[in-house]
Image (tube, rainbow, N blue to C red):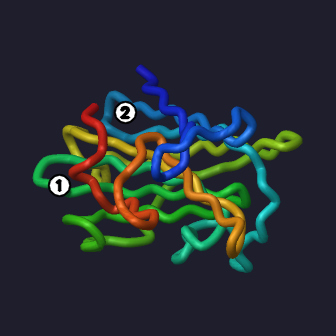
Amino acid sequence: MWNRLEIAETWDGQPIAQAERVQIAYQQTDTGDLEIEIDAPLHGDLAPTADPGPFWGLWEFEVVELFLVGPGGRYLEAEFGPHGHHLVLQLSGPRQIVARELPAQYGVETHGARWRGHARIEAVHVPSPIERINAFAIHGVDESRRYLAYSALPGPAPDFHQPHRFPSV
């Protein structure tokens, strides 16, 4: 069964325009693999210079991120860009990377002013059971950089690594 999230506010809780909102759907298959679908506006930011595929530093570009938290605060961070790049990380706690650039099947299509991503991550990389979740989108450069969230987080600046504050599933 697909679960649906809408990124509809800034990282600190201010509502955003409908045209800037991002839709994310996710589900676990019978084998525990994670399927993710993204429908997001295309902002036209520069693409990474690397070929599509795993890309360290994707958060510096236009990106949609899904965080899934499991028992003990371990979490999966899955990042996807409109140009075919992705980054999947396992973390044992905030910014405590256990494994990076994990494999994912990822494809993307552009339709006018929007892009759609389709990803699959093997069950071995997904925390189980999923206890908390959040999603984010980042786009723009310099002073026009935008940090958007499914569920806002506190702090003086955007900090997405607050898994204990994410909504329960």
Q: Position of residue 19 (x, y in %)?
A: 75, 37
Q: Nearer the viewer, residue 10 or 118?
A: 10
Q: What is the three-letter code of the residue carrying label 1?
A: Gly
x and y percent of residue 55 in the render? 56, 73
Tag 1 secondary structure: helix
Identify the image quadrant of residue 155. Answer: bottom left
Question: Which residue shows up at 31% across the image and 37% down it?
Answer: 32
Q: Which of the two discs, 2 and 1, labels the residue nearer the N terminus?
A: 2
Q: Secondary structure at mark 2?
A: strand
Between the C-alphas of marks 2 and 1, the distance is: 19 Å
* Residue at (33% x, 62% y) in the render: 161
Report the mark closest to the observer, 2 or 1. Answer: 1
The residue most toward the left is 72
Q: Residues within 10 Å of mark 1 (few under 14, many from 20)?
A: some
Q: Position of residue 18 (x, y in %)?
A: 70, 33
Along the horizontal axis of the image, is 61 left or right of 169?
right
- Residue at coordinates 41% horizontally, 20% vertically from top-left? 1
Residue 73's mark? 1
Kindly identify which numbered label has been placed on residue 60: none
